[in-house]
């Protein structure tokens, strides 16, 4: 089975227009996705465990709204979990899942 890779001319970015994407974590993956989405015209909010983390300062310097993970999830139509693998389960169990359940 071949994997189809999308680039600027085939990606359907318009599906995200008018939506808010929560980027959870702003490390090596989070910052790249956040910048790319913003450059594509998508609204982005960055959610962090620790708003005093050095990567949080980088997100703020880049001009992104910086909030807790719970607030990012509440604001989002789409959630991208981009914290390091060893923190993903904790982020989901403590901050994302309970917030999504309350939002229903």
Image (cartoon, grey):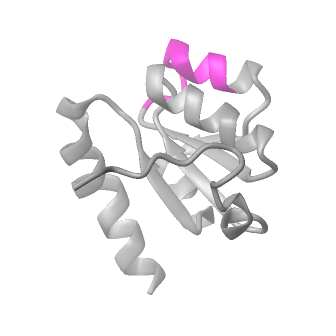
Asked where in the image residue 101 lies, by quadrant, the reply is: bottom left
Q: Is residue 2 above or below residue 102?
A: above
Pinpoint residue 47: horizontal percent, then vertical percent.
53, 43
* In the image, residue 37 lies in the stretch drawn in magenta: no
Taking the spot 71% from the left edge, 25% from the top edge, the residue there is 60
Q: Is residue 39 above or below residue 63?
A: below
Which residue is more in the foreground, 77 or 40?
Answer: 40
Farthest residue, direction bottom: 104
Q: Is residue 46 left or right of residue 38?
A: left
Taking the spot 46% from the left edge, 19% from the top edge, the residue there is 28
Taking the spot 75% from the left edge, 53% from the top edge, the residue there is 43
- Report the span colored magenta: 50-59
Which residue is more in the foreground, 88 or 9?
Answer: 9
* In the image, residue 55 lies in the stretch drawn in magenta: yes
Farthest residue, direction front: 1
Q: Is residue 1 above or below residue 19?
A: above
Farthest residue, direction top: 54
Pinpoint residue 92: horizontal percent, then vertical percent.
28, 54
Q: Which quadrant would the N terminus be assigned to in this image?
A: bottom left
Taking the spot 61% from the left edge, 43% from the top edge, the residue there is 7
Which residue is more in the foreground, 82 or 9?
Answer: 9
Classified by dominant secondary structure, the portion drawn in magenta counts as helix
Q: Which quadrant would the C terminus be assigned to in this image?
A: bottom left
Asked where in the image residue 8 lies, by quadrant, the reply is: top right
Pinpoint residue 75: horizontal percent, then vertical percent.
63, 63
Q: How many marks?
A: 0
């Amino acid at each position: 089975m071949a994997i189809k890779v999308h680039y600027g001319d085939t990606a359907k970015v318009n599906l995200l227009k008018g939506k808010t994407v929560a980027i959870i974590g702003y490390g090596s993956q989070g910052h790249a996705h956040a910048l790319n989405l913003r450059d594509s015209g998508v609204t982005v909010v960055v959610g962090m465990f620790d708003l005093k983390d050095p990567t949080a300062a980088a997100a703020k310097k880049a001009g992104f709204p910086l909030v807790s993970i719970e607030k990012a999830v509440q604001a989002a139509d789409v959630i991208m979990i981009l914290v390091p693998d060893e923190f993903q389960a904790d982020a989901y169990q403590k901050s994302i899942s309970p917030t999504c359940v309350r939002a229903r």
